[in-house]
Amino acid sequence: MSNIHCIQHPICEHQLSQLRREETLPSAFRAAARQLTQFIAIEATRHLQTRQVEIETPVSSTTADEISDRVGIFPILRAGLSMTDPILELLPAAAVFHLGMYRNEETAMPVEYYNKLSDAKPVDFALIVDPMLATGGSAVLAIEAIKAWGVRRIATLSLIASEEGISRLAASYPDIHFYTCAIDPILNSQNYIVPGLGEAGDRIFNTL
């Protein structure tokens, strides 16, 4: 599908191996996630709108391009927090809107518990960030909330996605682009990505 983008790069492959490795320490895990996030974010923002401005260099006057879009970062709590700062390093003027969701362990379905989007002005371009896209349930809740808020241009960023989840979402939302560093083949009986990397939030925040 043309709206699925899997980043291919030797550095990404190396950092993915660090994420997947069971013995990787939380600090190294966070560092690998940070670098992968920036790789994905650069691709996902390739088509941001810009405007021409007049500037002065030390030598002469010239025109230059500056980003004109108002960008919003939407981390899905809690694991999505790990992807926020790396994007803010690239886009320091971006706004951050938190979406609170947790996984019901009995049904494996996402449950939303925090959303204050209606209190703010919609952004021009939304980046939904969550390290793992498994069934896609959390992404669906986030997409629908952001669409209802009034945002038309949306992208989702994940470090690893399942083939089942990302294909289903890409077919359901042909107007949205999905970016990831790896697409793993299956989900297990608990709807965890296989081979995956385990529970991203626990590994990021050292709560295993």
Image (cartoon, grey):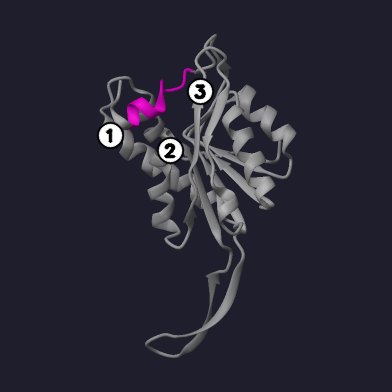
* Disc 1 residue type (three-letter): Ala
**Label 2 packing within 10 angstroms: few (<14), some (14-19), many (20+):** many
| Between discs 1 and 3, the one toward the N terminus | 1
Helix, strand or loop status at disc 1: helix
Query: Where 23 falls versus 62 (above or below)?
Result: above
As drawn, the label of residue 28 is: 1
Which dot, 1 or 3, sits closer to the camera?
Answer: 3
Q: CA distance from mark 2 to mark 1?
A: 14 Å
| 91 or 95: nearer the viewer | 95
Q: Residue at x 48, y 58 (%)?
A: 94
- Boundaries of the magenta span: 194-204
Kindly identify which residue carries mark 3.
Answer: 103
As drawn, the label of residue 12 is: 2
Q: In the displayed structure, does residue 23 sit left or right of residue 128? A: left
Q: CA distance from mark 1 to mark 3?
A: 26 Å
Which dot, 3 or 2, sits closer to the camera?
Answer: 3
